[in-house]
Image (cartoon, rainbow, N blue to C red):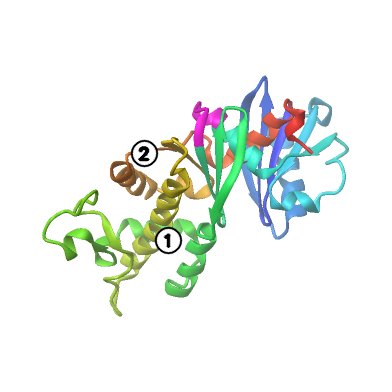
């Protein structure tokens, strides 16, 4: 077994790879990356009845991997660039060789994957951190599950200005239901549910539009969404609308939140991509 571990500052994702197939991915949160990493590794071994000598190699990636200086529990350990891991995991899970991988974490990165040619092409400072920060200020909570549940009861049209609100007819390439300005209709006494819908819409629409702009001139029309935000139910509304607007395709693979950990494990077989 190869173990892939995506080490965040407070959250670690871990997956085992057996015969190149992901097995029993889990996610653990803790107060720091070292506690999160070792807690996730120990729990993974325990829950799946795995012995240390069953593990051939551990592959680390993510911003928290820099805090780990030695082999994990004595198992040979290597590190993989996070952008490489994003691309390898997304390509494996989506079965798409030519795509822009949109990694929606605290912020969002864009990685062009064209077969074995993998390149980080940019990013934006909008992501889960934005969602939590705005919600902390405006809704007095940073619990993403609570925010999402509130948003499901809200109406984003109470917050956003649409093309149909400012024009009597569609503009070239812009249908009446397209967003003209995010939060432009927000009122002082806006309902919490509408605010939550507006915040999530702001984050997801911005990420989707930025991905489309990143694809300009590349000939790529497929975007693979990975990371925790890809699990938001609002993705099923926002991204299909962007597909129609921009004539692109957004894909959310089965293990979207674990793609980076999966990619790290896959990188073990491609030693030129690891360090």
Determine which of the numbered discs, if any, sits on residue 90 in the image.
none
Please tell me whether residue 167 belongs to the stretch shown in magenta: no
Residue 81 in the image: state x and y as whole percent. Answer: 70, 42
Label 1, secondary structure: give it.
Answer: helix
| Horizontal side of residue 94 vs 14, given as left or right | left
Label 2, secondary structure: give it.
Answer: loop
Nearer to me, 57 or 119: 119
Residue 268 in the image: state x and y as whole percent. Answer: 74, 29
- Furthest-top residue in this view: 19
Residue at position x 70%, y 60% from top?
A: 31
Residue 208 in the image: state x and y as whole percent. Answer: 41, 49
Please tell me whether residue 96 belongs to the stretch shown in magenta: yes
Where does label 2 land, which residue? 248
| Horizontal side of residue 54 vs 249, given as left or right | right
Residue at position x 37%, y 50% from top?
A: 234
| Residue 124 showing in the rendered view | yes
Q: Read off the magenta span.
A: 91-99
Q: Quadrant of the C terminus?
A: top right
Residue at position x 45%, y 47% from top?
A: 211
Determine which of the numbered discs, if any, sits on residue 147 in the image.
1
| Horizontal side of residue 72 vs 33, given as left or right | right
- Badge 1 local density, few (<14 within 10 Å), some, or many (20+)? many
Q: Compared to 137, does 2 lie above or below?
A: above
């Amino acid at each position: 077994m190869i173990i892939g571990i995506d080490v965040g500052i407070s959250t670690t994702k871990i997956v085992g790879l057996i015969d190149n197939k992901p097995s029993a991915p889990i996610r653990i949160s803790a107060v720091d990356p070292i506690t999160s990493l070792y807690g996730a590794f120990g729990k993974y071994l325990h829950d799946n009845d795995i012995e240390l000598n069953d593990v051939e190699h551990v592959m680390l990636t993510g911003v928290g991997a820099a805090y780990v200086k030695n082999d994990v529990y004595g198992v040979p350990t290597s590190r993989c660039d996070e952008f490489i891991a994003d691309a390898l995991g997304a390509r494996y899970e989506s079965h798409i060789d030519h795509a822009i991988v949109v990694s929606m974490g605290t912020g969002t990165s864009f990685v062009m994957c064209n077969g074995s040619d993998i390149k980080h092409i940019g990013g934006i400072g909008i992501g889960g951190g934005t969602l939590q920060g705005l919600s902390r200020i405006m809704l007095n909570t940073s619990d993403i599950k609570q925010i999402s549940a509130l948003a499901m009861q809200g109406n984003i049209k109470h917050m956003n200005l649409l093309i149909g609100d400012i024009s009597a007819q569609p503009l070239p390439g812009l249908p009446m239901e397209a967003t003209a300005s995010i939060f432009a209709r927000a009122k002082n006494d806006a309902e919490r549910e509408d605010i939550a819908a507006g915040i999530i819409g702001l984050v997801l629409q911005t990420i989707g539009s930025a991905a489309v702009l990143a694809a300009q001139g590349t000939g790529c029309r497929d975007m693979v969404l990975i990371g925790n935000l890809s699990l938001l139910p609002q993705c099923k509304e926002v991204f299909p609308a962007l597909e129609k607007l921009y004539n692109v395709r957004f894909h959310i693979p089965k293990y979207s939140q674990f793609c980076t950990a999966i990619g790290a494990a896959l990188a073990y077989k491609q030693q030129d991509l690891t360090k």
